[in-house]
Image (cartoon, rainbow, N blue to C red):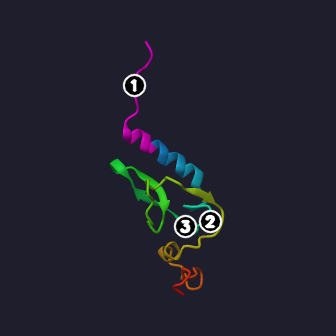
């Protein structure tokens, strides 16, 4: 008889978090192809699992690892820069119509 064991939700989430961490090792991330570049931080996920996500903790619709795009581009998110103690002045342009 075939092994009918299944992974628990925690094991599945931990596996997804580990895969994302390996993809992001030494890199930054984007949440969309043309979006701001975020520094990588750890975000508490479901079931107490920690996963890589934006250092500024900007939300993602489906959890911290959903839609992450690894990049070697420099961080352009003012909140991530400030979290690292870097003065973001002049590094992030205002939204169109607000500046």
Toward the left, the furthest residue is 47
In what quadrant of the picture does the C terminus appear? bottom right
Measure the alpha-carbon separation of dots 2 and 1.
41 Å
Under circle 3, the secondary element is loop
Q: Residue at label 1?
A: 5
Q: Is residue 31 above or below residue 97?
A: above
Left or right? Give the position of 64 relative to 26.
left
Judge depth for marks 2 and 3 and give the one in front. Answer: 2
Q: Residue at x 51, y 74 (%)?
A: 84
Instruction: Say which quarter of the image contains residue 6.
Output: top left
When the figure is inspected, residue 80 is found, relative to residue 90, above or below; the finding is above
Q: Pinpoint residue 65: horizontal percent, then vertical percent.
A: 49, 53
- Mark 1 to mark 3: distance in Å? 38 Å
Q: Which residues are magenta?
A: 1-14
The residue that mark 3 highlights is 38
Of circles 2 and 1, the one toward us is 2
Dots 2, 3 in contact, CB < 8 A: no
- How crowded pointer 3 is (Cα within 10 Å; few <14, some 14-19, many 20+) is rated as many
SS at badge 2: loop
- Label 2: how many residues lie within 10 Å, few (<14), some (14-19) or many (20+)? few
Q: Residue at x 49, y 75 (%)?
A: 79
| Residue 46 forms part of the magenta stretch | no
Q: Residue furthest bottom?
A: 99
- Relative height, residue 41 to residue 94 (above, below): above
């Amino acid at each position: 008889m075939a092994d009918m064991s299944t992974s628990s939700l925690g094991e599945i989430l931990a596996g997804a978090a580990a895969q994302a961490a390996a993809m992001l090792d030494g890199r930054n991330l984007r949440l969309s192809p043309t979006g701001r570049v975020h520094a990588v931080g750890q975000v508490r996920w479901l079931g107490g699992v920690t996963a890589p996500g934006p250092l500024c903790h900007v939300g993602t619709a489906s959890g911290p690892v959903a839609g992450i795009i690894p990049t070697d581009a420099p961080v352009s998110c003012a909140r991530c820069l400030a979290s690292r103690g870097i003065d973001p002045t002049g590094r992030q342009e205002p939204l169109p119509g607000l500046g």
